[in-house]
Image (cartoon, helix red, strand yellow):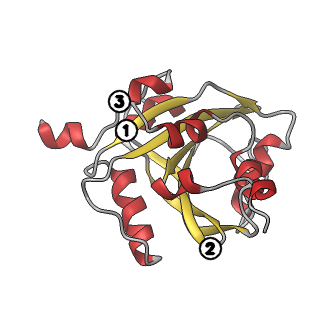
Amino acid sequence: MRERSLRQANWHGHVLAVNAPAGLRRWLTAGGSLTAQLKNHSDSFRVQVLHQHVATCLADEARAIGLHRPGRAWEREVLLRCDNRPVVFAHTVVPMSADASDWPLFSALGERSLGTTLFGDPRVTRGTLEYARLRAGHPLAQRARAALATAGHALPDEQLLYARRCLYRRRQGSLLVTEVFMPTVAALVPRTLNTR
């Protein structure tokens, strides 16, 4: 039972429920496009695609995308980098019931930002943000740590990670985006303040 509880997150409708540090809280609650905000906080922004394929969705996201239990979904995972430093691990799932007319650009994103596509399409509706604290045993925390380690930026196992997620809808399709914020994101400053 303990192992199962470590592998699932408790998602909350208010950021104060996860007790995130102040420097991270402003990123967790920021409205609008995260991509646009990260670009404003770096000289060089990049989306590093880790993979995009069919996988089984996680237990704590199945219901959010309309499944009774974990099932197959399209999955995309990326690292968002500011000045080559990974600052956000992003995980997206789309139910297999969605088709190309629901999310026409999803399969061809490559290293383009999903956020730019979502916020640039007037047919996309955004749900409410939910927040969670991810312990080391949660699959997304494990994947984020593995991606960071491969990129040469290891995190200690005891480091809590804070995440937010949001459900997007377009036509008949739903798409769930979870963003796991690395502690380094708190140190970013807007480019206007970062000039020499």
- Figure quadrant of the N terminus: top left
- For this rendering, which residue is in front, 22 or 38? 22
Q: Could you give the CA–CA distance between mark 3 and mark 1, rounded to whole angstroms?
A: 8 Å
- N-term mark: 2 or 1: 2
Q: Amino acid at mark 3?
A: Asn
Q: Which residue is mark 1?
A: 133
Residue 121 appears in the rendering: yes
Residue identified by numbered label 3: 10
Looking at the image, the residue that sits furthest to the front is 196
Q: Earlier in the sequence, mark 3 or mark 1?
A: 3
Between disc 3 and disc 1, the foreground one is 1
Q: Position of residue 152 (x, y in %)?
A: 43, 78
Residue bearing mark 2: 84
Figure check: 196 above or below 94: below
Q: Judge from the rendering whether residue 168 lies leftward or rightward of residue 162; answer left or right.
A: right
Left or right of residue 143, residue 119 in this image: right
Please report contact status of discs 3 and 1: CB closer than 8 Å, yes or no: yes
